[in-house]
Image (cartoon, rainbow, N blue to C red):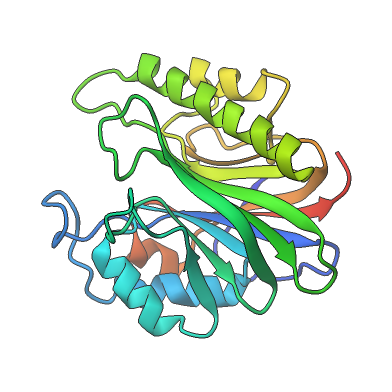
Amino acid sequence: MSYIDRVGSFVSRDDADIRVMSYNLLVDSDDYDWGTPLGERPTGAVECLRHYSPDVVGLQEASTGWFAAFRELLYGEYEFFNPDFKGEKDYVNTALIYNVRKVRPVAGEVAVYSVSNCDRMRLVNVGVFERIADGRRFAVSSTHLDSDYPGDRTPERLIQIGELIETAERYNAGYGCPFISAGDMNITPDKPEYRALTQNGVFTDADQAPLPNIVDHIFRTDGVRSLRVAVVDDENTRGASDHLPLFADFVLGGC
């Protein structure tokens, strides 16, 4: 069952093999006029990452300012994987970062959804990683499904979900490792899109009892078992973004 960590105190992961986080950062206004000035927001986000020390983080709304701030503040700790957008030497807004001391990247891709209201955000950014300690592999994707702007985007999200499922199946088959999908899905657990994700025989919510109003989720395929999911609500995260990050701890090899 998920819980809200209101004081940023939960750090123990001795019983877990990997920790995956999903974090919508809220774009900065230099890149998007509906964003919020970056200011000191990266400092709070970085404190959260250092405190919880996830192996891989799926980032959403990671605009240019966020890339620059993370590369400066997290140098030698985390690196971006698959940051390029369509070979244009520009940044994707749905990004992956990984802890260089714990895991190394093996393979991956950036696949833009066939339908989208923002190509740079609406994509699947996938990385296959292996633990430095023992070489065991797992795949993580960061994704950000369509928002309901300017109107209902349920049909488009259902198409995106179908493509996300196909990606997970392809990586399961191609690399023989579990697939974890983290992201801002823009859906709550009562929506048909959530049912499409959790009743397809491929994905299971890492959280067995998700909070009713949450739109950020972490899903898993077979081959990995979730131990806990937590939403981080503390001074750092409240000041950094309009979303709260969540993380999930996993044991590899079980389901």
In the rendered image, the vertical position of residue 196 relative to residue 2, given as above or below: above
Residue positioned most to the left: 33
Report the label total: 0
Q: Can residue 8 be seen in this view?
A: no
Residue at (48% x, 34% y) in the render: 213
Q: Position of residue 20 (x, y in %)?
A: 63, 57
Is residue 195 visible in this depiction of the protein?
Answer: yes
201 relative to 101, above or below: above
Is 143 positioned to the left or the right of 239 in the image?
Answer: right
100 over 61 or under it: above or below: below
- Report x, y in % for residue 18: 74, 61
- The x and y percentages for residue 233 are 49, 59
Left or right: 173 in relation to 243: right
Q: Which residue is drawn at 46% across and 18% down?
A: 158
Q: Which of 250 and 222 is in front in this view?
A: 222
The furthest residue to the front:
87
User: Looking at this view, is 38 or 11 the one in front?
Assistant: 38
On-image quarter of the N terminus: top right
Name the quadrant containing residue 168: top right
The residue that appears at 15% across and 48% down in the rendered structure is 34
Position of 78 compared to 175: left or right? Answer: left
Q: Residue at x 39, y 74 (%)?
A: 70
